Image (cartoon, helix red, strand yellow):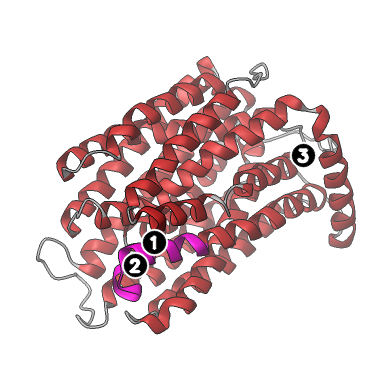
Amino acid sequence: MTAAAAIVPRTNPRAAIFGWCLYDWAMSAFNTVIGTFVFSVYFTKGIVGDPEQGAALWGIVIGVAGGAIVLLSPVLGAVADHGGRRKVWLAACVAVAAVPTALLWFMAPDPSSIVPTMLLVGLATVAFELSYVFYNALLIDVAPPGMLGRVSGWGWGLGYFGGLVCLVIALFGLIGFGGAAPLLPLPAVDSAGPRATGPLVALWWVVFALPLLLLVRERPGGAAIGTAIRRGLADLWRTLKSLPGQGNLVRFLVGSAVYREGFNLLFAFGGIYAAGTLGLDFGQLVLFAIGLNVTSGIGAILAAWADDALGSKPTILVSIAALILIGIPIILVTDPVWFIGLALALGLFLGPAQAASRTLMGRLAPVGGEGEAFGLYGLTGRATGFLGPWLFAAATAAFASQRAGMATVIALFALGGLVVATVREPARG
């Protein structure tokens, strides 16, 4: 990893911090509305027509997208380190993701829409994850060293609330809730409401990405694109060859990849599981979504100070332990009320674990090599990405039960936490 940018001064205006945090608000709508609570459920029940088969197909598309992310994220991150213009790369990812997301409007509730939907969701998911590489790398440009944990936590918390607000708009504006008609008079036939969430999320994403693009200042300089590609690939190759001698970094990358795959599975299949196994009706599913986002956002914001004061590693380990202790009864209960109550408690520890993981990666990354570092972070996070959803799908199909699939989440949390417990956290500045 290069340290060429180490002498470049960094700026940390409040406006830049706000703009950076607001991108979490922008992109979280995709996970919340499309990936977890609305469109994924519409895919399994409306397009596929069978919860188990739909969950398996959704797992396949997320797994294939994860394989593409494994190949692309470290390469593009390394190239961006040498070429600069991370905001340009991020803007390109937003555009590539927004178009297929908007096109979900055309996916009718019919099996003929299965393959087109999988292609659109897969492409949007790849661009979504790649934008995260450049977004995370900008954290070091935005946050003072002593505030990395707080800025990361604020962004993550704001993301949860952004996803929640977009979900509420989708429910009351497009779908209708509690017997009330949606505010926008969409046709009642052909599931127009769930389909309209695609254009809504695409517009939301683009609009709220603009403050980051306008307010965040990058470190100046950078090579031409051809030179950046050559240097980035060469630097990435050197870094990969040196990884066997960087045990501390490798342990963090591997351990965090494992428990982050548990997060990915939880978000990708939480709504599907709640509807298919617990039998939650639409109103209960909405309460589940709202409560989980609220408690996760509160947890991320409150734990941001602990991240800076106590360290990222302790924040991660305490959160992982709590997730396991709460997660076990979640997959055992059959009462929807107990399920929703436990999910609210679970949310308090989801945000802190995610935000502190990003902070620790930022502290481990060398100055000027943040893009490559977060590219490797994305690579390792997705190295299990093509296995996790397929394991979920295989367990669900083998036992004819989504509970079996969700049980893999607990195992991923435990294994990842044990590995990260061996990581030495750098001194905090």
Q: Which residues are magenta?
A: 45-61
Q: CA distance from mark 3 to mark 1?
A: 38 Å
For the C terminus, which image quadrant?
top right
Magenta run includes residue 100? no
Up-down relation of residue 325 to residue 292 (above or below): above
Instruction: Pick whichever of labels 1 and 2 is earlier in the sequence.
Output: 2
**Mark 1 highlights which residue?**
55
Give the residue type that dot 3 points to.
Gly
Number of marks present in the image shown: 3
**Disc ID at residue 44:** 2
Tell whether 114 sits left or right of 127: left
Marks 1/2 in contact by CB < 8 Å: the verdict is yes
Pair 3/1: label in front: 1
- Identify the residue at the far front of this view: 398
Up-down relation of residue 278 to residue 141 (above or below): below
Q: Secondary structure at mark 1?
A: helix
User: What secondary structure is the magenta-colored segment mainly?
Assistant: helix
Residue 51 appears at what percent x and percent y?
A: 31, 64
Q: Secondary structure at mark 3?
A: loop
Write down the quadrant of residue 53 in the picture.
bottom left
